[in-house]
Image (spheres, rainbow, N blue to C red):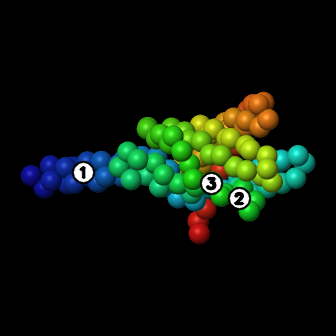
């Protein structure tokens, strides 16, 4: 009986540990982007509340709320719009959250042209 109880306890603990391994986009993510030969620090702040994903993206001195955000099974997608000194830029993010890495592609639309670039953001420990 003691052995059965010990086995059941271990299985319960293993189940709890597995639940903690589920990807979670909530947090502050950072990466550096190359824009016209200049490095710009980008900060993505995300919060998952139930199935609703909200947040902001900051690039340089600009910050924008995310729109059309979706998150399911480790996959996140959203878009942001910026106005850089009169130049309108729209960025669509799509990526995968694994541990402390959010990695994927971003489609950058500017002046009617779209450029697709990869990104790899790391979760900030702050």
What residue do we see at 46% from left, 48% from top? 53
Label 2: how many residues lie within 10 Å, few (<14), some (14-19) or many (20+)? few
Going from N to C along the chain, the mark reached first, 1 or 2, is 1
Seen as rendered, the residue at the extreme top is 113
The reply to whether the C-beta atoms of the residues labelled 2 and 3 are less than 8 Å apart is yes
| Foreground label between 1 and 2 | 2
Could you tell me which residue is drawn at 59 percent across and 42 percent down?
79
In the rendered image, which residue does mark 3 sit on?
A: 64
Report which quarter residue 67 is drawn in: top right
The residue to which callout 1 is attached is 12
Q: Give the secondary structure at mark 1.
A: helix
- Sequence order check, earlier mark of 1 and 3: 1
Q: CA distance from mark 2 to mark 3?
A: 7 Å
Compute the Cα span from label 1 to label 3: 43 Å
Q: Quadrant of residue 63?
A: bottom right
Within-10-Å neighbours for mark 1: few <14, some 14–19, many 20+: few
């Amino acid at each position: 009986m003691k052995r059965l109880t010990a086995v059941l306890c271990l299985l319960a603990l293993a189940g709890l540990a597995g639940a903690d391994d589920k990807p979670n986009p909530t947090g502050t993510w950072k990466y550096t982007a190359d824009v016209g030969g200049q490095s710009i620090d980008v900060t993505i702040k995300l919060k998952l509340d139930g199935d609703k994903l909200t947040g902001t993206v900051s690039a340089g001195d600009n910050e924008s709320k995310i729109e059309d955000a979706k998150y399911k099974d480790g996959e996140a997608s959203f878009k942001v719009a910026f106005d850089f000194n009169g130049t309108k830029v729209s960025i669509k993010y799509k990526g995968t959250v694994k541990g402390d890495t959010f990695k994927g592609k971003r489609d950058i639309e500017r002046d009617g042209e779209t450029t697709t670039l990869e990104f790899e953001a790391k979760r900030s420990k702050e």
